[in-house]
Amino acid sequence: IFYILGFIVICFSLLFWNKWLRIIALSSVIIGLGFHFYGILLRMIIMGRPPVSTLYESIIFVGLISVLCAFLIEYSRKDGLGVLVASIAGSIFMYISFGYASDGDTMGVLVAVLNSNFWLATHVTTITIGYGTSIVAGIMGHIYLFYSILYPNRKKRLRSIYNNTFGITILALFFTLFGTILGGIWADQSWGRFWGWDPKENGALLIVMWHLMVLHLRVSGMAKPLLFCFSASLVNIIVALAWFGVNLLNVGLHSYGFTDSVATNLFVFIGFEILLCSSLYFYGKRYIQKKY
């Protein structure tokens, strides 16, 4: 509720550039974050482990990381953009979590392969932080695409959004790469091999390679800001495939995550993201950039 309220207020704030509305929105999101963090803390105390062992727990944890990461943007910018990202991420992840809490029991018995507080606190936590920062990078890419169409003549602000997207992408690459390496070490201890082309492993590697591709496009000069942010925005699809999509395959050693109930929603999301981001990119490239 507080995330949604913050989103509504910050939209009005950005529309009218009202400082007090931004403060109200920031306060609302901070209250939402407080409840969010308190709920996760209670789960940790009750279960005696990091709250990242099930899909439900990973959703609420990635949501928390996304909001915290967005606050870093707000701390550096102080213009409401970070609040907008935080409210969007918090609202979306809380809504998604409802679907995985419908049976009323979100504190089930821990799967045997996950029964290691050390690896839950290192690999699983690190890779889920990578998910969260990747989502924020994707949201920042969306914001740049929208902003470049709505305010194409505000070059300085567009440049700052572009730089923020670049910085968050580097942060996301670090956590996803480091988390994937830690996962290999855990796999070597548990299953006797560092890498086995398991779908979940491939999904994690796919996120790393996508971030590397996006960063190389910028460093090599092959991608201008609009193309870079378009590519960054599509990382949301890659994360969704690595997070939920691989569970639809029903193969691999990560058998504790199998589910077939998200197929329709997942494919609708992928189609919507491709259509939205592609439309924004080609419209901005064809009409806006030529004009300015």
Image: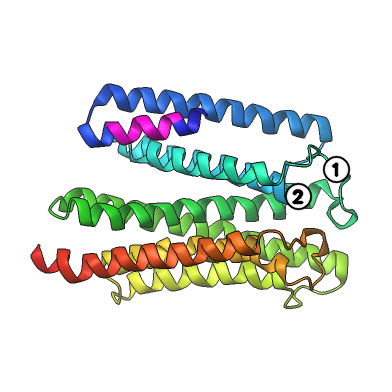
Residue 108: mark in rendering: 1
- Place of residue 154 in the rendered image (x, y in percent of width and height, measured from the top left): 15, 50
> In this image, 234 relative to 176: left or right?
left
- Place of residue 133 in the rendered image (x, y in percent of width and height, measured from the top left): 51, 51
Residue 54: mark in rendering: 2
Q: Is residue 11 magenta?
A: yes
Residue under the image location 81 percent in, 38 percent down: 105
Q: Are marks 1 and 2 in contact (CB under 8 Å)?
A: yes
Of 35 and 104, the residue lying toward us? 104
Q: How is the image coloured?
A: rainbow
Quadrant occupied by the C terminus: bottom left
Depicted 84 relative to depicted 152: above or below: above
Image quadrant where residue 16 sits? top left
Q: Amino acid at mark 2?
A: Thr
Point out the stretch of residues depicted in magenta: 5-12
10 Å neighbourhood of mark 1: few (<14), some, or many (≥20)?
Answer: few
Of 18 and 130, the residue lying toward us? 18
> In this image, 4 relative to 163: left or right?
right
- Gap in angstroms between the C-alphas marked 1 and 2: 9 Å
Mark 1 / mark 2, whichever is N-terminal = 2
Q: Amino acid at mark 1?
A: Gly
Depicted 270 relative to depicted 103: above or below: below
> In this image, 287 relative to 195: left or right?
left
Q: Secondary structure at mark 2?
A: loop
10 Å neighbourhood of mark 2: few (<14), some, or many (≥20)?
Answer: some
